Amino acid sequence: MRSLTSRIAFLFAGFVIAVSSAYAAQNLQTISVTESNALIQQNKSNNQFSIIDVRTPKEYAQGHLANSKLINFRDNDFETKLNELDKSKTYLIYCRSGGRSGMALTAMERLGFESVYNMDGGFNEWSSAAFPFEK
């Protein structure tokens, strides 16, 4: 009986280590608009980096970060669209003020994305800091 208990404990410890390693491999964090701008500049020619705007199409049309892709947080198939993305790429996500992109960060973590940066303060903070955007 003791050896069965030892085996179960050993297997459970292995499972905990595997799960911990999977989460440790993820780089999911919220960064400032200044850090977001630096991240964009560092990755201008990196095809493994993408910017995702999770606002509505109307908000996107009023102004957005260059080369950003719109995936509307309010769409019923939002998580399905996220799940179709390459989870090994690095993403910068943003919304108007940080609420929706914060929830999107949580969804992306749950879906197994490896590297996601959430822009704190969103587009409002970005435009207030006079960083460039397009319409």
Image (tube, rainbow, N blue to C red):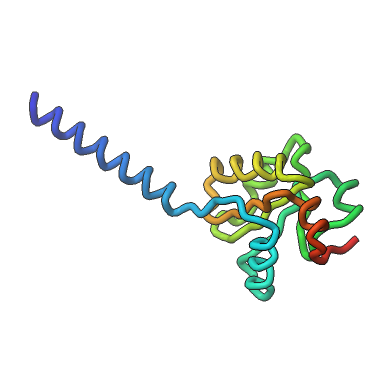
Q: Please identify the quadrant where the C terminus is shown.
A: bottom right
Q: Residue at x 90, y 46 (%)?
A: 58
Q: Position of residue 90 (x, y in %)?
A: 59, 60
Indicate left or right for 134 with 119 as reference.
right
Reply above or below: 36 against 124: below
Which residue sits furthest front?
Answer: 129
Relative placement, left or right, of 122 versus 63 is left
Query: Which residue is farthest bottom?
Result: 45
Residue name at image x 48 percent, y 52 percent = 26
Determine the image quadrant of residue 97. top right
Q: How many marks?
A: 0
Question: Which of the image's four quarters has the N terminus?
Answer: top left
| Residue sitting nearer the eye, 122 or 91 | 122
Q: Left or right: where does residue 3 sit relative to residue 117?
A: left
Measured from the top left, where is residue 24 in percent x and y?
42, 51
Q: Toward which corner of the image does residue 80 lie, by quadrant?
A: top right
The quarter of the displayed image where residue 115 is located:
bottom right
- Where in the figure is residue 43, as x and y percent of width and height? 64, 71
Residue that protrudes farthest toward the top in the picture: 1
Name of the residue lying farthest toward the left? 2
Residue drawn at 87 percent across, 47 percent down: 59
Front-most of 45 and 64? 64
